[in-house]
Image (cartoon, rainbow, N blue to C red):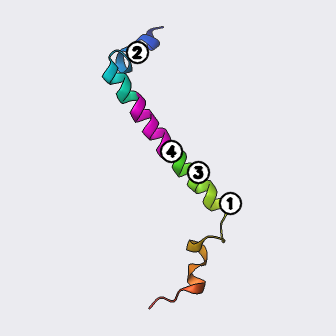
């Protein structure tokens, strides 16, 4: 019970603390999810994306 009370006092005691915790957590989750899904997408579509086949169609000068 002590850990719950400490967590509450650290993040949810006042309204601005709770809002800060919620928005920070949502932002961190969004960044983690976005990065993970981009890696999954790139692995599933390897060799079929423009960044993979660009060298076949564009000449570097």
Highlighted magenta segment, given as a residue range:
22-32
Which residue is label 1 attached to? 44
Which residue is label 3 attached to? 37
Mark 1 and 2 residues: CB-CB less than 8 Å, in contact? no
Mark 1 and 3 residues: CB-CB less than 8 Å, in contact? no
Distance, label 1 to label 3, CA atoms, is 10 Å
Q: Earlier in the sequence, mark 3 or mark 4?
A: 4
Q: Earlier in the sequence, mark 2 or mark 3?
A: 2
Write the residue at 46% across / 13% down. Answer: 4
Where disc 1 sits, the SS reads helix
Above-or-below relation of 61 to 23:
below
| Residue at the farthest bottom position | 61
Which residue is label 2 attached to? 8
Distance, label 4 to label 1, CA atoms, is 18 Å
Q: Earlier in the sequence, mark 1 or mark 2?
A: 2
The one nearer the camera, 14 or 6, is: 14
Disc assigned to residue 32: 4
Crowd class of label 3 (few under 14; some 14 to 19; many from 20; radius 10 Å): few
Overall secondary structure of the magenta stretch? helix
| Residue at the farthest right position | 44
């Amino acid at each position: 019970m002590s850990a719950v009370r400490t967590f509450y006092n650290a993040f949810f005691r006042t309204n601005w603390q709770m809002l800060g915790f919620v928005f920070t957590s949502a932002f961190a989750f969004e960044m983690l999810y976005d990065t993970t899904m981009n890696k999954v997408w790139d692995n599933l579509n390897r060799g079929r994306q423009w960044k993979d086949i660009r060298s076949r169609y564009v000449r570097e000068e």
